[in-house]
């Protein structure tokens, strides 16, 4: 099926307005498969370069079962979650091509069931190490942050460090805490707000954006010939960080 946009509507190759029926797939894609990245596990949490997301959202040998179930429910469209960390966790410019090939196989399998996908580069409050998911841990380290001390200093609330019982729905408060807010400020406005902050000799804003875009572009290149990929999002729920804030005491007490 060919999908095009006409105004605010999706149109098929016959000129019919489409109502896409689908779901997000899947929350599990936010954490590593190996080792188990469940948010409550502290052991190995900081070894963020040596992880694998191959197997998220599910092992390849389970794909038929899941796609058949989705198709039987009448769901033929998926917002398919991936993360920057899954692609570039090992370090700047070091791509996990095993993960990219795995994603290609999952997307190809979805096509066998007539399921179309919109690829969603997902993030929540920047990173797993600031209480959410998305960016690799090394992005924070290059900004001068010690991941092991973010919880203790109040720069982030992280399940693995806070322990249980973890307060329900407290994770979004990380958007206004030092770690995530700083990273979003650097990512979107570092040239203006912190022009002397460099990462490997490059302005932080340009370095972070360049690596983020390159990682998603690498995935897009691998999927370029699959007919059921209808497009890519830019970034899930981007946040402004400290942009527009004159006094941190007014916003982040």
Image: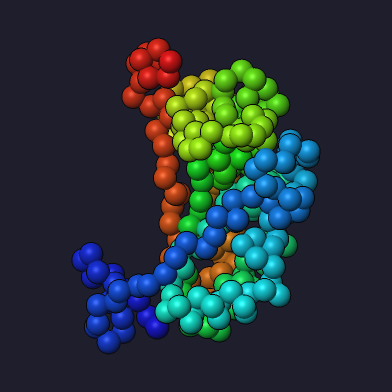
User: Which residue is pictured at 67% across the width and 22% down the height?
Assistant: 149
Q: Quick one: quadrant of the N terminus?
A: bottom left
Closer to us: 191 or 212: 212
Total numbered circles: 0
- The answer to whether 25 appears left or right of 241 in the picture is right
Q: Is residue 215 above or below residue 190?
A: below
User: Which residue is pictured at 42% across the width and 45% down the height?
Assistant: 237
- The answer to whether 102 appears left or right of 247 in the picture is right
Residue 223 percent location from the top left of the image: 56, 69
Q: Quick one: quadrant of the C terminus?
A: top left
User: Which residue is pictured at 66% across the width and 32% down the height?
Assistant: 163
Is residue 76 shown to the viewer in this render? no
Closer to us: 128 or 208: 128
Q: Is residue 179 above or below residue 42?
A: above
How is the protein colored in the picture? rainbow
Is residue 17 shown to the viewer in this render? yes
Q: Is residue 165 above or below residue 212?
A: above
- The answer to whether 49 appears left or right of 85 in the picture is right
Residue 182 percent location from the top left of the image: 50, 26
Residue reaching furthest left? 7
Q: For residue 233, what is the image quadrant?
A: bottom left
Residue 91 percent location from the top left of the image: 70, 42
Residue reaching furthest bottom? 14
Q: Is residue 94 above or below residue 246?
A: below
User: Which residue is pictured at 63% across the width and 74% down the height?
Assistant: 63
């Amino acid at each position: 099926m060919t999908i095009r946009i006409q105004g605010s509507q999706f149109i098929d190759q016959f000129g019919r307005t489409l109502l896409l029926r689908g779901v997000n797939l899947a929350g599990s894609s936010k954490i590593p498969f190996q080792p188990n990245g469940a948010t409550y596990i502290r052991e190995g949490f900081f070894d963020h370069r040596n992880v694998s997301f191959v197997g998220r959202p599910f092992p390849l040998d389970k794909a038929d079962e899941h796609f058949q179930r989705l198709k039987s429910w009448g769901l033929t469209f998926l917002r398919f979650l991936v993360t920057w960390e899954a692609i570039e966790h090992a370090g700047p410019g070091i791509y996990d091509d095993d993960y990219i090939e795995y994603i290609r196989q999952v997307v190809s399998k979805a096509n066998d069931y007539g399921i179309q996908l919109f690829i969603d580069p997902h993030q929540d409050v920047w990173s797993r190490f600031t209480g959410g998911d998305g960016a690799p841990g090394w992005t924070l380290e290059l900004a001068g942050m010690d991941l092991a001390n973010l919880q203790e200093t109040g720069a982030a609330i992280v399940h693995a460090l806070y322990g249980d019982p973890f307060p329900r729905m407290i994770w979004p408060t990380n958007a206004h805490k030092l770690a995530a807010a700083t990273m979003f400020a650097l990512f979107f406005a570092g040239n203006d707000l912190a022009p002397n902050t460099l990462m490997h000799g490059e302005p932080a804003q340009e370095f972070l954006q360049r690596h983020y875009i390159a990682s998603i572009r690498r995935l897009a290149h691998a999927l370029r010939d699959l007919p059921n990929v209808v497009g890519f999002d830019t970034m899930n729920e981007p946040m402004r960080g400290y942009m527009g804030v004159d006094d941190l005491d007014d916003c982040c007490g």
